[in-house]
Image (cartoon, rainbow, N blue to C red):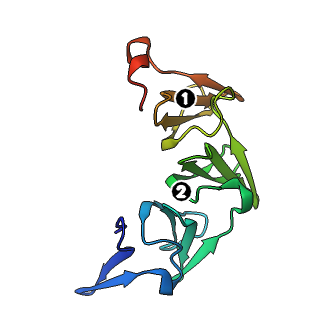
Amino acid sequence: MGTYGNGLLSYAEGTWRRLDESAGLPSLFVTDLAASPSYGGDAFWIGTDGGGLALHREGRVERVDLATQLTSGAVYEILETTSDQGARAVWLGTRNNGLIRMSRGYWRSFQPYPETPDVPVAAILQTREPAGGTTLWLGTDGYGLAAWRDGAWRDTTPSPARSATTA
């Protein structure tokens, strides 16, 4: 269980265990936890506010270096996906750096609204289309709902909701 200020808590065999910075956690402010099928077993991603991203696997926490991609250190949302061709990717919704994707060991930033860089991304969801393919949905803080489909971003916020654009 992630906490905002108390690190990560786990419960096993009747005992609570706390993971903090001494265990490798990059920040005590945990904002998201997401399964990591690509690493298998009980591996999962840890998003933090101020410390960026970490991976918990084989009982250890490993900090993930995002270099200049994540200037604020705030990861709000994590989603690991697999494309129809089998390529795996990790998507990060951030506070001040838009959307970041890691695929094949490389990190890349995406801006769903190019005219407004560094949109806060608070939610990520991937859906499969009935005719094939996928859509990546982004809920933003203050900019509405965006969708990546067929190689392009689309603003899908309904017209009546444009005045209240947090999705």
Task: Name the quadrant containing residue 64.
Answer: bottom right
SS for dot 2: loop
Task: Name the quadrant containing residue 10.
Answer: bottom left
Mark nearer the viewer, 2 or 1: 2
Kindly give the residue lying farthest to the left in the view shown. Answer: 14
Task: Determine whether label 2 and label 1 are within 8 Å by CB.
Answer: no
Q: Which amino acid does label 1 sit on?
A: Ala
Q: In which quarter of the image is the C terminus?
A: top left
Task: Name the quadrant containing residue 129.
Answer: top right
125 to 164, vertically: above or below:
below
SS for dot 1: strand
Estimate how packed mark 2 is, as few (under 14), some (14 to 19) or many (20 or more) residues with alpha carbons within 10 Å. many
Label total for image: 2
User: In the displayed structure, does residue 1 sit left or right of residue 157?
Assistant: left
Residue drawn where x is 34% and y is 69% of the image: 1
Of the residues under marks 2 and 1, which one precedes in the sequence? 2
Estimate how packed mark 1 is, as few (under 14), some (14 to 19) or many (20 or more) residues with alpha carbons within 10 Å. many
Q: Which amino acid does label 2 sit on?
A: Ala
Mark carried by residue 74: 2
Residue drawn where x is 55% and y is 29% of the image: 146
Place of residue 56 in the rendered image (x, y in percent of width and height, measured from the top left): 52, 75
Mark carried by residue 38: none
Residue drawn where x is 70% and y is 54% of the image: 69
Q: Residue 7 or 154: which is nearer the viewer?
A: 7
Kindly give the residue lying farthest to the top in the view shown. Answer: 159
The answer for how far apart the CA atoms under marks 2 and 1 are is 20 Å
Place of residue 159 in the rendered image (x, y in percent of width and height, measured from the top left): 44, 12
Place of residue 143 in the rendered image (x, y in percent of width and height, measured from the top left): 50, 29
User: In the displayed structure, does residue 40 sit left or right of residue 71?
Assistant: left
Place of residue 3 in the rendered image (x, y in percent of width and height, measured from the top left): 34, 67
19 to 157, vertically: above or below:
below
Residue tagged by mark 1? Answer: 146
